[in-house]
Image: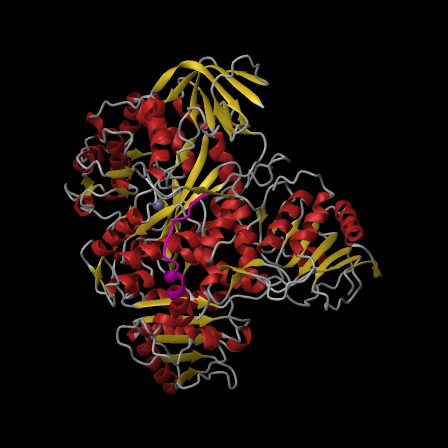
Amino acid sequence: MSEARIDGKPASLAAAAERAAEILSAARMPVIAGLGTDVAGARASILLAEKLRGAYDHMYSVRIFADLDVMRQAGLMFTTPNEARLRADVLLFIGKDLTKIWPAMMTRLSPAEIPPFDLARKPRKILWIAPGRGGAKVEGLAVQTLDSSDLHAALAALRARAAGRPVSCAKRMLRKLDEFAEVLKKARFGVAVWGGDSLDCLMIEMLHGLIRDLNKTTRFSGLPLGCDSNAAGVVQASGWMTGFPVRTSFGRGFPEHDTWRFDATRMIESGEADAAVWISAYGPEAPPWKKNIPLVALASPQTAFAREPQVCIGVGCPGIDHDAAEFSRETASIVGRLASHGSPAPSVAAIIGQIAKHFGEDASC
Amino acid sequence: MLILLKGGRIVDPANGRDEAGDLWIENDRIVAAPPGRLADEVHDVSGKIVMAGAIDIHSHIAGGNVNTARLLLPEKHQNHLPNPPALPLSTAKWSTFETGTIYASMGFTTVIEPAIVPHQALQAHLELSDIPIIDKGTLTVLGNDDFLLSLLRDGEGQAAVADYVASAVAASNGLGVKCINAGGATAFKYNARTFSLDDVVPFYGLTSRQIVEALQRAVEDIQIPHPLHLHANNLGIPGNVATALATIEAARGERLHFAHLQFYSYGAEGDRGFSSAAAELAAAVNAAPNVTIDVGQVMFRQTVTISADVLRQFNGVAMAKPKKSVIHDGDGNGGGIVPYLYRENDFANAVQWACGLELFMLIDDSWRVFFTTDHPNGAPFTTYPEIFALIMNRDARAEATARLPPEALAMTTLPSIAREYTLSEIATMTRAAPAKLLGLKDRGHLGEGGLADIAVYTRGKDLAKMFRFAHLVFKDGDLVVRDGRVTHYRWGKALKVNPGYDKAIDRRLAAYYDHHFGVSRDLFAVKENFLPRTGMFREVACAR
Ligand SMILES: [Zn+2]
């Protein structure tokens, strides 16, 4: 992709921004989707959505709300990778593909090291529930695994056994559950690590119930691995700017949040949204919807679209092409990253800023 | 631009003024009456009250814990009101934009977010960048951070502690140092469920008292104007006045700011084992000129408690209303978010409400008692106008008191107190004294050369209305509020100190982060290029 295209033909950035503004101003209900961008890009996008009276969503909302819905229904206990690395004497992994979600996870948590801030200074105990085929490997340490085709049932049974309640299941399974429960109850500072598509809200809620129960007598916390494309950073920025996470709309002139109504893909497929901005600066993710609607794309140059967008602008990757603040899985906080390979590729914030200029010159924010 | 505020009542206790007079503004400063020049803009404010812009020294308006609270409680801040086009997001409840808008319309021009752990500092400054109009600052939270505790355990000496504290404040662009339940959050990671002044942090073998003393000295050594800002042990527990008294004693006559004292003013008397000990505590504060306090007034309504005292918050989870809470075992302090409903007909809540007002009334020196609700822990900052009315008018207080359970009132001295704050005392408590406490020489007064942060109020029978809707507010000489409405956004500064220290500690810290955390310390530094605007920091001089 050259720096910008209009209807597939090379164009200047200024012309592309102008055309994008035309498309968006003609729309009744535009939606800003994808939102794979740094904090500055999210900030600019939310301010633009406010001007347009449109809605905004993130490409990984399904996973975002698996954790967030549990938090706002029941609460949550969580910790950071630093604390897990330095203190956790028990690590409870849940689900498959954790090291695919976070390739550096084992280096970062360094489970084979004796946790330096643990009083007993003993080797860690590693438990893994439903690791999938060949998944549960920790170099230098034995891993106790518990396989289950029904993760919710397994977590419910484990919670029951940890609380000393009976469960009805096969003898071998019961023995395994009791082994796990013993390790969990004897943990001094245990950490449960989960992520990926294999856990839904019900499972995460059950897991949180287990964590809460364990804290009656000992310390235990959670470490959700979250999603890529700065999902957590976008949710944070959305939180302080509007009070709400993504899937929020300005259709009535103030932010309203609804995970079903303002699901970007649903809005587009149903015809409620009549123009879209797709933002994917971290990688070549393409829009997931099938419907053909006017599209402005701010995307990684390698992105392969099913249909050529009306306006397509190549953007740089945060932290690589330009300096960026973003949520880091390594630290579970927003961190600053200086450009590792600085380039003139524009940032999402810069392009959105150019588009926004066409909706009034007040650079008040 | 030369502006004249003509004929108002100038209430400026820092300069000993309370009289009718004119006030001149040129650009962003207050100036002497310029002979022979005509004002470009004249505001007739005769009969109105003219004060410096108010300064809030303790209000949780930004940072990871505050934002988690927003995300935890979407049902508590549904919106109904579109914003004016010039003020995007200003009506979005609990947004940073709304925060700045409401503060400004009440005449507040500087607000300090008092609880930012170094690893959350970048997020906090990003949030502060989106709070319009007001200036802000942060206090850097130390006292449960492993590096500090290891320095103390290893007896590395006060110089190393001071260097570390200076480096941590500088990296997080803080204005001062806060300590929250010193050692308590770390002890909680080792499964402690209570933690008092002389309890020992496992693994480190240090008492809370030792940590507080070391931080208190470090702040003095590196000459940060604001004394150590302390959230003590045992917050919210019946009988905790003993802890408060011991903590004041432990300051050994050295400067100390004791945060939200109301939450520590509880006795254990009476049938229910809960009573006000505010009178006794106020007497101790009166007798300790080295100590300043802020109140942390409780008001009856739904709120959410947001605190980096994770141990205390964990113990409060059962009290959550609605029934959900977040407990975060973070790097250093972490925190807890527990929604809470203060009810007028609840015995304990009524005692708490009375305790706060007793502290306001019984601490004599309005230079040493600060006006806070510990927003939002005692009440949201939007209740300030009602609290001004309560402390300025004994009839308003009597009326509110009459609605409380009599058995609660019997546990307090409040009904016997007749004091009413004067406007000059209000201006001291909310303007002159905070500026002095934070080392902000350019504000909190209306003297020549001062920053033109000015609030003009219309005096009326309804004191709450007077303070809720300022008649005019100037920020840096720019008229931003008319009749309680913000007219446009501007962007305030973040105030910070930049204490000097031996940079050798940075090399040690870099190695500590690489080895212990396995990540670079640079990730956490607050650098300007990550914020939406540059040139937004203003340095406050270290030295007293
Ligand atoms: Zn506080």
User: Which quarter shows the C terminus of chain B?
Assistant: top left
Q: Report if residue B142 is visible in the image.
A: no
Total numbered labels placed on residues in the image: 0
Horizontal and vertical percent for residue B503?
39, 59
Comparing B480 with A229, the one in front is B480
Horizontal and vertical percent for residue A290?
74, 64
Horizontal and vertical percent for residue B389?
35, 25
* Rendered view: A55 above or below A8: above
Would you say B203 lies left or right of B178 here? left
Write the residue at 72% across / 41% down: A359
Q: Quadrant of residue A79?
A: bottom left
User: Which quarter shows the N terminus of chain B?
Assistant: top right
View quadrant of ligand 1: top left
Q: Is residue B278 magenta?
A: no
Would you say B520 lies left or right of B245 here? right
Q: Which region of the structure is painted magenta?
A: B495-508
